[in-house]
Image (cartoon, rainbow, N blue to C red):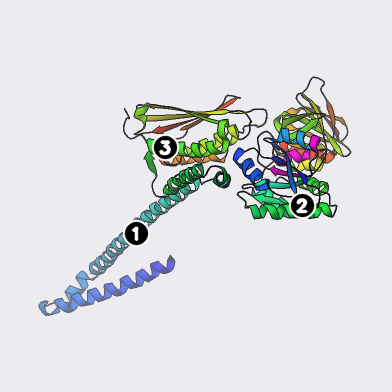
Amino acid sequence: MSEKLQTLIIEDEELARNLLRSYLKDHPGIEVIGECENGFDGVKAINEKKPDLVFLDIQMPKITGFEMIELLDYKPQIIFTTAYDQYALKAFELNAIDYLLKPFSKDRLLAAIEKVQHRIQNGEDSAEKLEELTNLHPGYEFIERIVVKDRHKIHIITVDKIRYIESLDDYVMIYTTDGRHMKQKTMKYFENNLDPKNFIRIHRSYIVQVDNIAEIQQYEKESYIVILKDKDKTKLKVSKTGYKKIKEVLHF
Amino acid sequence: MGRLILFHFIAASILCGIWVYLSYAIYQPFIYDNNNFLNDGLPSKIFVGYVMYIIYLVFFYAVNYYQSLKEKIKKESEYKALIREAELQALKSQINPHFLFNSLNSISSLTVSDPEKAQEMVINLSTFMRYSLMHNEKEMVSFSRELENIKLYLSIEKIRFGKKLNAEFEIDAHCLEAEIPNMILQPLFENAIKYGVYETTEQVTIKTICECDGNLLKITIINQYDASTIKRRGEGIGLRNIRKRMEIIYHQPDLIKITDHKTSFEVQLVIPQKQAVS
């Protein structure tokens, strides 16, 4: 391969960055074009610099490596690095994604780079695999926050701020206490990963935060609407199964 | 039960027969009027025979019952101690693998750039691990010992996080002799780092205040956190385990108090002392 891989390091710990840099320093196929200390800078750098390869730490301040991938317009080849995260490892194995367990040897690193070079030569794209990775169930816990990007700004929505979620074909619109945000995810994903004690799928098109329900009204025989606790008194349709779920959660 | 009564009745009858016969056989040479002896004393003799059998029986059962009760009480207290032990064991914090592997990675990096510092970190990490292994043997340690260990833990994390982690201590010197369950503080600092330092890019101060008040040692740990990225859930597993462990050791609820000030998080531990610390 004649051209060097344009490589970005995204890692919050200085010592870990130093080590990666020293390992990569005299690699003939790699040119490190930048380093980022957190996920925010990472998203920006990837979208702007469009590197071929990114070393991405999973556990980082503000947003995690996984959350970062959801925000990328451009998806490079990624080698994940992590110290200990059993859920992540399972996800990597399932999707045949490259990862390095800290602390790792130079040999392990070189082998991982070789695999990436091989994939690039074969013209394999990473986008699909990464997409699958982000759609996986996060495992042991319900999600606590959602990361979204509007034009150039990244917002972190903690789940307690969500009023309701509406489905829009391939996207969802997330209505929060201070605005609304679009996100490319399925309703199914949110239905599975938000705590069902707090969020109910009341309709094919709506998931509602329980505390946000002001009242439930019957407007026809066997059909109901939910009225939310907000200025506009937003009204949302409730399906038959949705009504059953509301009854179960609210015990009436 | 019915069979048992029948059995005892038959046994009593046989023994009674033997007893009456024997007494008759023994007394016979000394008695002139055999008929009188038999006729006068027989019903009362038989009655006494049955009563004596019942007395023996009651005595036998009482001794038997007493012994099995003693055994049972002993077993029960052994069992309770075992459960307590197991509970305490389960509630004690284990070294977080995330902390361990990240520290090892820092060491790996330092071996290239600063071998001396790498060596220092290896030694600190070993000392810290040795202390945390020791807690299998001893339940209580002096506060100064526990504090030393915490400072060791923070110094290891400080190498990882650099300027981002800032630790401040306000310790009343005469608190140092107080007794404290070992490794009870470490999970609190681990939480402070996880939610405070790890989730933000700015510097975070973890402040530890310690005062003695008669028979109480009060330890307060305050850390800043970034409320925009995390939703504090109040009590996680770490805090819950500490609460349970304190309850088992001191038989008192509410020795741990948690306050969320929205930009900072405060945990206060109250540790009762056998003697007043002064």
Q: Are marks 3 and 2 in contact (CB under 8 Å)?
A: no
Determine which residue is flagged by label 1.
B65
Q: Residue at position x 60%, y 24% from top? A: B263
- In the rendered image, residues at marks 2 and 1 fall on the same chain: no
Type of amino acid under label 1 = Tyr
Q: Are marks 2 and 1 in contact (CB under 8 Å)?
A: no
- In the rendered image, residues at marks 1 and 3 fall on the same chain: yes
Judged left or right of residue A212, residue B236 is left
The answer to whether residue B271 is visible is yes
The answer to whether residue B243 is visible is no
Q: Residue at position x 72%, y 31% from top? A: A156
Judged left or right of residue A188, residue B234 is left
Q: Residue at position x 78%, y 22% from top? A: A230
Which one is nearer the viewer's eye here, B207 or A107?
Answer: A107
Which one is nearer the viewer's eye here, A130 or B253?
Answer: A130
Q: Is residue A19 above or below residue B17?
A: above
Which one is nearer the viewer's eye here, B214 or A203?
Answer: B214
Q: Are marks 1 and 3 in contact (CB under 8 Å)?
A: no
| First of labels 1, 3 by sequence position | 1
Determine which residue is flagged by label 3.
B148
Determine which residue is flagged by label 2.
A116
Q: Which is in the foreground here, disc 1 or disc 3?
A: 3
Q: CA distance from mark 3 to mark 2?
A: 46 Å
Q: CA distance from mark 2 to mark 1?
A: 77 Å
Which one is nearer the viewer's eye here, A42 or A177?
Answer: A42
The magenta segment: A47-74
Based on the picture, tell me whether residue A67 belongs to the magenta stretch.
yes
User: Toward which corner of the image does residue A93 lie, by quadrant?
Assistant: bottom right
Q: Is residue B174 above or below residue A24?
A: above
Q: Residue at position x 62%, y 44% from top? A: A19
Q: Which is in the foreground here, disc 3 or disc 2?
A: 2
Estimate the x, y position of residue A194 in percent, counting from the top left: 73, 39
